[in-house]
Image: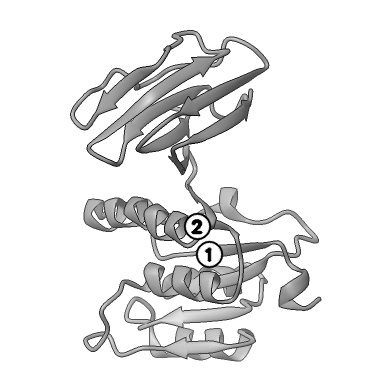
């Protein structure tokens, strides 16, 4: 299958990964491993279509395994680069024409990296891509107004939180939620949008202006 026929790029980064992140059998995603994320794929029998990064988080022998398994490897100097390995991987996915991108392992113990990866959703959005940041307990995407986002009830993620990524997000209307909003505004520093829940099998988020993080989560 050529890259043009694949609909989604799945990026595996060096954050927290586990069995939950493994794709279903037969998945035809374009698999990108960023630094240690490439080793995760190889160790689970998945040949990365692209391995990218400075690979400073793995041993030389492990890098050899990655290079042997990956269809393509792009190695960067750990000092002479401006972007994190995750951003390098995302830019590669965007540059190769993928408009649906999922980042696995972008959330972990390093809060600076986690927050930077949340901000990368803005890079994807500005490039006309839909990107989702996923870990074992969360799925995060960015909504830019004007837009309407439909959500189906999902028992894996009972909570839905809305947090502005721009200074303010306005014209927010929620339908099918336990705590509805009508033409509301959320500003950075407000917790009003935290821990809502769908009250129906489907719900809808309408946003008139601004940028809004839509975070589906579980405990």
| Residues at marks 2 and 1, CA–CA distance in whole angstroms | 5 Å
Q: Nearer the viewer, residue 147 or 87?
A: 147
Q: Nearer the viewer, residue 164 or 58?
A: 164
Q: Say above or below: 144 vs 47.
A: above
Q: Quadrant of residue 96?
A: bottom right
Residue 188, located in which quarter of the rendered image? top left
Left or right? Give the position of 184 relative to 206: left
Q: Is residue 32 above or below residue 107?
A: below
Image point 22% across, 37% down: which residue?
167
Quadrant into which the N terminus falls: bottom right
Q: Nearer the viewer, residue 163 or 22?
A: 163
Tag 2: Cα neighbours inside 10 Å, few (<14), some, or many (≥20)?
many
Q: Position of residue 7 (x, y in %)?
A: 71, 62
Colour scheme in the image?
Answer: one colour
From the top left corner, tell me how far across and down residue 149 is, in percent. Answer: 56, 32
**Numbered tag placed on residue 194 in the rendering:** none
Label 1: element kind: strand
> Mark 2 vs mark 1: which is more N-terminal?
1
Coordinates of residue 104 in the picture (x, y in percent): 50, 56
- Crowding around mark 1 (Cα neighbors within 10 Å: few <14, some 14 to 19, many 20+) is many
For the C terminus, the image quarter is top left
The residue sitting at 46% across, 38% down in the picture is: 138
The residue under the point 58% across, 10% down is: 199
Residue 11 shows which numbered tag? 1
Label 2 residue SS: strand
Residue holding disc 2: 103
Q: Are marks 2 and 1 in contact (CB under 8 Å)?
A: yes
Instruction: Point out residue 185 in the picture as x, y percentages from the top left corner.
Output: 31, 22
From the viewer's perspective, is 194 left or right of 112? Answer: right
Q: How many marks?
A: 2
């Amino acid at each position: 299958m050529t890259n043009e026929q694949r609909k989604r790029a799945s990026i595996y980064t060096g954050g927290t990964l586990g069995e939950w992140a493994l794709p279903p059998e037969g998945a035809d995603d374009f698999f990108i491993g960023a630094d240690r994320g490439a080793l995760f794929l190889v160790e689970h029998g998945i040949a990365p279509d692209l391995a990218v990064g400075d690979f400073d988080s793995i041993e030389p022998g492990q890098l050899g395994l990655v290079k042997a398994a990956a269809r393509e490897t792009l190695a960067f100097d750990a000092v002479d680069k401006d972007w994190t390995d995750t951003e390098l991987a995302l830019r590669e996915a965007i540059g190769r024409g993928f408009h649906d991108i999922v980042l696995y392992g972008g959330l972990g113990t390093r809060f600076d990296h986690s927050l930077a990866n949340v901000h990368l959703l803005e890079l994807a959005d500005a490039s006309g891509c839909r990107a989702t940041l996923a870990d074992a307990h969360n799925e995060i995407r960015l909504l830019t107004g004007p837009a309407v986002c439909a959500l189906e009830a999902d028992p894996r993620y009972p909570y839905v939180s809305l947090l502005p990524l721009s200074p303010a997000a306005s014209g927010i209307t929620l339908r099918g939620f336990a705590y509805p909003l009508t033409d509301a505004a959320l500003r950075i520093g407000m917790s009003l949008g935290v821990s809502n829940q769908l009250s129906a099998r489907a719900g809808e988020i309408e946003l008139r202006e601004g940028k809004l993080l839509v975070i589906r989560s579980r405990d």
